[in-house]
Image (cartoon, rainbow, N blue to C red):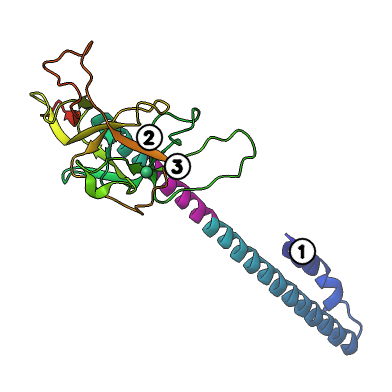
Amino acid sequence: MASLTWITLLFATLPSILCTETCDNKFEYEFGVLQKLEMLEKEKTHLATELNVQAYTNRALADQVSALTRQVTEFINNTLNGLLNRGFQNTSLSNGSTYIRWGRTSCPSSRQMVYEGYAGGSHYQHTGGGANYLCLPKDPMHGEQASLGHSYVYGAEYETGSTVFNNIYEHDVPCAVCLSSSTSLLMIPARTECYNGWTKEYSGYLMSDKYSHPRREYVCMDGNPEATGSSNNDNGALFFFVDAKCGSLPCPPYVNGSTLTCVMCSYSTNN
Ligand SMILES: [Ca+2]
């Protein structure tokens, strides 16, 4: 718009500047031509400046468009990936289940390992804290340090004595979290085989803490356990065998004082 204003002004004043019909002499005529040339030169410089400004504006706009394009592309990709991941997880959860394989660093060959960890739990002498064992991942993520109301998680040891599992006595206990494609999982105590229609994930011995210690859950320790860490007698969370006691528990079929076994079974509607 500024250029048009200049051009309009120039042509509006040309007749008086050139004075080709009305000038009195050659000097006035040449003076008018020089004035016209000077105005044209100014107009040329002005137009060149405007062109540069426009070019700069165009480059800035192009940069903004590129930045917006990158942002939109990144947003779309992130959104699509999030939807795909959620879809995968939902599909997995709707078609599978997880379980902890105590005493092992890996899952059965047909199962995907979610993570490998260290078995742990509350101290065997503490009456508070959690009653369950934990499979603590090897790559923990730490939060802000709290200052009040602690309970404690210790690593776990095999308190297995000198007969069964004697080679791992006092060693630290590993664990593996496994993903099964099956829809249901069931740990059966006092069995080493599953019932018809179920698939055996692993079998072993039923374990918990000692009868004279604060209560702990029962879990199924793999029958071929591995040892990790040290064999130091640190006594944090402990795994003891579990024996059957006759009475309300009928014998037979149970045997008084016998060490109880266990099996982890899965069931799938696709079996
Ligand atoms: Ca110990």
Is residue 171 shown to the viewer in this render? Answer: yes
Relative horizontal placement of residue 230, taking residue 48 as reference (left or right): left
Judging by the rendered image, the residue that carries numbered circle 1 is 8
Q: Residue 154 carries which label?
A: 3
Q: Give the range drawn in magenta.
A: 68-83
Residue lying at 31% horizontally and 40% vertically, measured from the top left = 159
**Element carrying mark 2:** loop
Question: Which numbered disc, 2 or 3, marks the residue closer to the eye?
Answer: 3
Residue type, mark 3 in image: Tyr
Q: Where on the picture, by quarter, is residue 112?
A: top left
Whole-Å distance between the Cαs marked 1 and 3? 89 Å
Q: Ligand 1 is in which quadrant of the figure?
A: top left
**Residue 128 percent across, percent down from the top left:** 50, 28
Reading the chain from its start, which is encountered first: label 2 or label 3? 2
Is residue 91 shown to the viewer in this render? Answer: no
Look at the magenta stretch and give its main secondary structure.
helix
**Residue 45 percent across, percent down from the top left:** 74, 77
Residue type, mark 1 in image: Thr
Question: Height in image: 152 above or below 33?
Answer: above
